[in-house]
Image (cartoon, helix red, strand yellow):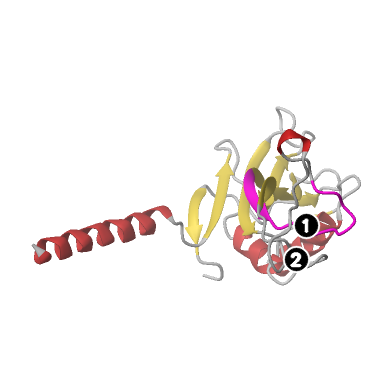
Amino acid sequence: MKNHIAILLSLLLAAFLTGCASTVPNGILITAQRDPAFSPARTNTICMSILNNPSRENTDLGAALMAELVSEHFNIVTNSDADYTLAYLIEDDSTSEIVPRATHPYINPNMAPPPGLHGTLVPLTFENEQPGEPSMQTTIEPAEYVHPDKGIRLYLYTNPKTHAGGLQIAWQGCIEAGETVSPDREPLLIKTLLGYFGQDYTGRIELGQ
């Protein structure tokens, strides 16, 4: 009987571990999509877009992106008749949810206790509690919890002056960054994403590979 119980527990543990391994993703997510009608390459002339009232994050991103483009010998130009225009932004896909939160209110010696049954007053203090200290009483309140999720997204637009059909997205790519796009990781994130420039790809990789 004991052997049967031990085997059952082992099987349950193995199933649990296998399930976790299959549901927890490894690495950072990269998505890249190219319009089949276009084949953008580093040799094409590319003009950087100018953002209106950019945030500090996007300003820093633009500077880091330009430095990496020059380092990797992209054909960056400033004239308006470039083959493509490259737009960039810090993408925020953070989500929030309401969760219960336990609080321990402080005892205020100047605050009257709430009314009890039949209009009587009941104290909130417990034995050994002193005014100004956290109460042993627990209050459950709703609170907002934010799941931060940021990333870097690039859009490569066609130039209506050089391509028929007006403004179109020839390629776009995004790389997730986690809770924040930190300055120390930003150059590596950009370099990694540019490795998929002009390609189609969706998958997770280890940063730095």
Q: Residues within 10 Å of mark 1 (few under 14, many from 20)?
A: many
Relative horizontal placement of residue 78, taking residue 26 as reference (left or right): right
**Residue at (75, 52) in percent of width and height:** 123
**What amino acid is labelled 2 in the image?**
Val
Vertical placement of residue 67 versus 151, above or below: below
Nearer-N-terminus badge (2/1): 2
The secondary structure that dominates the magenta segment is loop
- The quadrant of the rendering that contains the N terminus is bottom left
Secondary structure of the residue carrying numbered label 1: strand
Relative horizontal placement of residue 189, taking residue 15 as reference (left or right): right
Secondary structure of the residue carrying numbered label 2: helix
Residue placed most toward the observer, 159 or 1: 1
Numbered mark located on residue 76 in the image: 1
Q: Which residue is mark 2?
A: 70
In the current view of this chain or complex, which residue is farthest to the left?
1
Residue 33 visible in the current orientation: yes
Whether pointer 2 and pointer 1 mark residues with C-beta atoms closer than 8 Å, the reply is yes
**What amino acid is labelled 1 in the image?**
Ile
Q: Residues within 10 Å of mark 2 (few under 14, many from 20)?
A: few
How many numbered marks, from 0 up? 2
Task: State how far apart marks 2 and 1 are (Cα).
Answer: 7 Å
Vertical placement of residue 29 versus 188, above or below: above
Is residue 108 a member of the stretch shown in magenta?
A: yes
What span is colored magenta in the figure? 98-113
Residue placed most toward the observer, 22 or 69: 22
Is residue 200 a member of the stretch shown in magenta?
A: no
Residue placed most toward the observer, 8 or 65: 8
